[in-house]
Amino acid sequence: MKRYRLLAVSGIGVVAVLVGVLVFGNLNGNLVYYLTPNEALAKHADYAEGRRFQLGGFVRPGSERRTADGLAFVVTAEVRPDSAAVVVLHTGPVAQLFQPGIGVVVEGSWRGTEFLSDTMIVKHDENYRPPGPAPQPGTGGDPR
């Protein structure tokens, strides 16, 4: 009886270790990291032109402008004007929630001192606010 209990406990232990390795061992490969502008500028030499990575930060207010290829804006580490900044040339679709001052993660690679991106993810909070009521015609609102 004691031998069977020892085998059962040992078998359960082996199964628990295997499940742990399968679940947590593969977790690190599925995590996606991004560099802040400070880190990206410091590691610029490590990321040769063409090597893709993700860059995350805040869109500097007043820096966004439409270009022939897409959108150009500046990503900063903090909202302060003196924080590290990277010029981003974005050629892919622009997220609907994109606006100045909001957190953004872009994926792409260096092209000289500019970051050329084609993928954008906008960071936002979990609070949903429905749009306000539409103005009625003739009440002074926008007639569109």
Image (cartoon, helix red, strand yellow):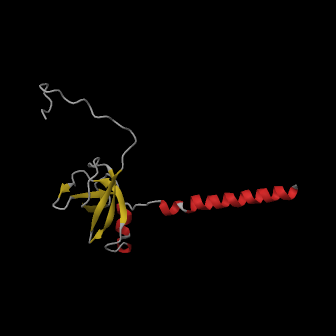
Q: Is residue 144 left or right of residue 95?
A: left
Q: Quadrant of residue 44?
A: bottom left
The residue at 88%/55% (across/down) is 1
Residue at the spot 37% in from the left edge and 68% down from the top edge = 42
75, above or below 49, in the image? above
Quarter-wise, where is residue 116 in the image? bottom left
Name the spot of residue 136 as percent of width and height, x first: 17, 26
Q: Nearer the viewer, residue 23 or 3?
A: 3
Numbered label tally: 0
129 or 77, nearer to the observer: 129
Side of 140 where 89 appears, left or right: right
Q: In the picture shown, does residue 11 fall above or below 102?
A: below
**Residue visible at 18% across and 55% down in the picture:** 65
Q: Nearer the viewer, residue 108 or 80?
A: 108
Q: Residue at x 12, y 32 (%)?
A: 143
Indicate the position of residue 139 as horizontal and vertical percent values: 14, 25
Question: Where in the figure is residue 32, as x and y percent of width and height?
Answer: 44, 60
> Where is residue 52 shown, x and y percent of the image?
35, 68
List the single residue furthest toward the top: 139
Q: Is residue 140 left or right of residue 129?
A: left
Residue 14, placed above or below residue 140: below
Front residue of 40 and 136: 136
